[in-house]
Image: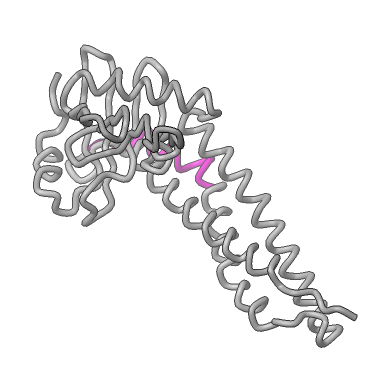
Amino acid sequence: MKIFLLAAALLWTSQAHAANVVFDHPSAKAKLTVHTEDGAPTPAAISYEGPLGYFLVTQAELAGLAQYDGWMQTTNNVYTLQASGLQFLDQSYSTPRLYGYAADDSVPALESVIRTLQAKGQQEAPDEFAARVADLRHRAGRARMTLNSMTAMARMSPGSVQNPEVVAQQEKPIAQAEKDVAEAAALRVTGEADAARAAASPEDPNPRADFYWRESLKLDSASSALSASQYALDQQPVPAY
């Protein structure tokens, strides 16, 4: 096993502006790319390229695998991305096991996680990206329709919307989410291919993995904005006549 791109590994060690670090595991025929937001103490996601396919696994998705046992009052099956490896905690009171990213046993450990996520509906990174874009387009359309309807109602029948200022405040976040989703949809055609052809560099040792991670962050932001705006609109009181 070897760490791919020494310069990137040194950036990882210093934690100074580290974004992506690649760990190549020839014996397991797999490559892991660890993604960390600038200044963050722990990674936000990890990409896997190997026999199972190509997957992006986020810290949030790992958190979703945890199982709470109310009888024993323990949290079991806890996976987290640490600075130096994938940590697994079988039970709250047990000693955690750390699978270092540079160690070959990190590959089967991550593959076990991916199989569990697949059973829950997780798809390979390109398909997951496409599905998320389609879902967010639908949600953005619903939010826009609700906003337009309530805006027109407030204009045509003053008093029919009790908090028109709250409704108006949703225009900006919904418009930004629409823009982000439209850009992501366009990148489905060009961005993936460009990232796959891009040459690795010390600053970006795996452009393809970096592409899906960056787009995942943008879609997360759009999703959060749409959820907040839709909630604000849905909570508007209906006047009692």
State the quadrant of the N terminus.
top left
Q: Is 187 covered by the magenta stretch?
A: yes
Q: Residue furthest right?
A: 241
Whole-percent x, y for residue 31 in the image: 27, 25
Say whether residue 198 is left or right of residue 180.
Answer: left
Whole-percent x, y for residue 43 in the image: 27, 44
Q: Is 207 covered by the magenta stretch?
A: no
Q: Residue at x 38, y 40 (%)?
A: 58
Q: Residue at x 77, y 73 (%)?
A: 150
Q: Is residue 149 visible?
A: yes
Q: Residue at x 53, y 28 (%)?
A: 120
Q: Nearer the viewer, residue 237 or 210?
A: 237
Q: Quadrant of residue 194?
A: top left
Q: Is residue 65 visible?
A: no
Total marks shown come to 0
Q: Residue at x 17, y 37 (%)?
A: 84
Q: Residue furthest bottom?
A: 158
For the stretch drawn in magenta, the main secondary structure is: helix
Say whether residue 208 is left or right of residue 118.
Answer: left
Q: Quadrant of residue 20?
A: top left
With respect to residue 151, does 11 lie above or below? Answer: above
Whole-percent x, y for residue 28 in the image: 26, 14
Q: Residue furthest top?
A: 27
Query: What's the magenta region?
Result: 186-200
Q: Nearer the viewer, residue 81 or 72?
A: 72
